[in-house]
Amino acid sequence: MFKTVRGMRDFLPNDAEKMRYVEQVSREVSKLYGYEEIITPVVESYELLAAKTGEEIRQRMYNFEDLGGRKVALRPEFTASVARLVATKMRNEPKPMRLFSTGSLYRYDEPQYGRFREFWQANYELFGSTRPEADAEILILTNDLLKRLELQNYRFKIGHTGILRGILNQEGLDEGQQNRLMQLLDKKNWEDALANARGANVSQKGLRTLERLFETRGEDAFQVLESVKETVQEYEGALAAVENLWEIFELVRDNGEQMDVMVEAGFARGLEYYTGMIFESYIPEIDVALGGGGRYDKLIQLFGGESIPAVGVAQGIDRIVLSLNKQKVSPKTAKERSVVVISVKNESKAKALELSAMLRKAGLPVEVEVMGRAVSRALADADRRGVAYAVIVGPEELKAEKVVLREMKKREQRTVEISNLTEEILVSST
Ligand code: AMP
């Protein structure tokens, strides 16, 4: 017997519906904020995908040679593909440009809770603005999405790559050295990060500054930033980063929506292309991030385009579904309004089809009994599968232009006029 390949999953109807629900709400949010959807291929050139993603992801890419001898890989993230488009086919589009993409991604991660080798994201990228309004928009949009999904107690961890890079630049570390240090911080490996900095000849002052930064975090954003400012006062680049984050927080605060944040000065993310604000979203019940993003102002240039600033976020659809399950939030599903239409006798079969078409026209999901079962057995089956209503089409009622409408959960049924049937179901299901 065949099984799914390790790290790969089948989604049976219940789970598939939840995944698609989160995707659908993500798409609605993209429209509400003016993000236009693009579809890019799952297979891209290895060079493109490897260019600026983190070392860790690079090593976990599904890469292979296609039959034409091209070195290709399955995309481990969307940003490289979107950046490729923006640097090429879309380079003359007016800015700002807001793009949305959703689909599956592939990383050869060790399978564990919330970590799969094939997973789905909803991705939002805003191109053309260096201003804090753009960063704030991405945070506000993420907050809005999680709220619409009715997730509870979610929060944001926020930092700024410019704080650490500002210090490391001034200390003379090259980009490769900086990236290695960031990888360690991404893994919360503070000790090794400090040892690494020492090995890269960071000054005593620099080491003390880093050590203090790694300990600086808190929920009062402005208070944390005041303290970071003091710690990094001799590092110009880092100070500018703190200033930038301050402006972003002011905008998020003034937007009026409640947003729980934890500011972490030593926060780093695995992807190398970030240049500014970075963040992740969480719920307390699960210790992996639901989504993550940040600003990346240099990537488009790297792919041969002009310099176009960008900020974006990837929402992890799988982990959002895990969170909804964990918090027992069940989205309104099509099942709650679903109808099965059963004809009692052979001669009412055509009428059953006609009524099904009528109900579907009104937007109700309808299944027709196709197994030729007795009404009692068809009802038992509908009950087992959680169908909400049954319409029983019998010759006696039909003579009076009526059918029987059964509310499955309540185990109640009544005879209704066919002309009122749609309305009766719509009213009782809202
Ligand atoms: P990243 O692209 O690494 O910034 O990740 C963004 C989001 O994608 C994460 O917060 C997760 O929700 C999701 N994600 C990343 N890797 C995986 C994985 N292996 N399995 C499931 N979800 C993932």
Image (cartoon, rainbow, N blue to C red):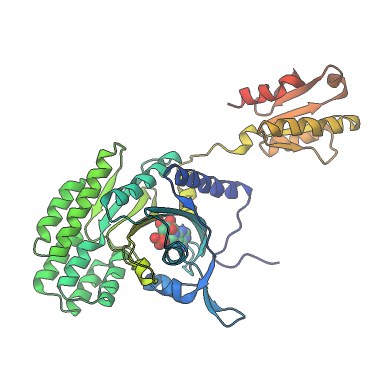
Tally of numbered discs: 0
Quadrant of ligand 1: it is bottom left
Tell me: 378 left or right of 47: right
Quadrant in which residue 48 is drawn? bottom left
Q: Tell me if I can see residue 52 in this picture.
A: yes
> Which quadrant is home to the N terminus?
bottom right
In the image, what residue occupies the spot 17% across and 59% down? 240
Tell me: 254 left or right of 430: left
Tell me: 270 left or right of 113: left
Query: In the displayed image of the protein, which residue is found farthest to the right?
Result: 347
Relative depth, front residue between 204 and 90: 90
| Residue 157 place in picture, x, y as percent | 30, 52
In the image, what residue occupies the spot 12% across and 56% down? 229
Tell me: 170 left or right of 37: left
Q: Tell me if I can see residue 150 in this picture.
A: no
In the image, what residue occupies the spot 13% across and 65% down? 209
| Residue 94 place in picture, x, y as percent | 39, 55
Query: In the displayed image of the protein, which residue is found farthest to the bottom?
Result: 69
| Residue 343 place in picture, x, y as percent | 83, 31
> Which quadrant is home to the C terminus?
top right
Whether 207 is drawn above or below 389: the answer is below
Quadrant in which residue 233 is drawn? bottom left
| Residue 103 place in picture, x, y as percent | 53, 57
Whether 225 is drawn above or below 208: the answer is above
In the image, what residue occupies the spot 25% across and 41% down? 253
Whether 274 is drawn above or below 319: the answer is below
Relative depth, front residue between 238 and 281: 238
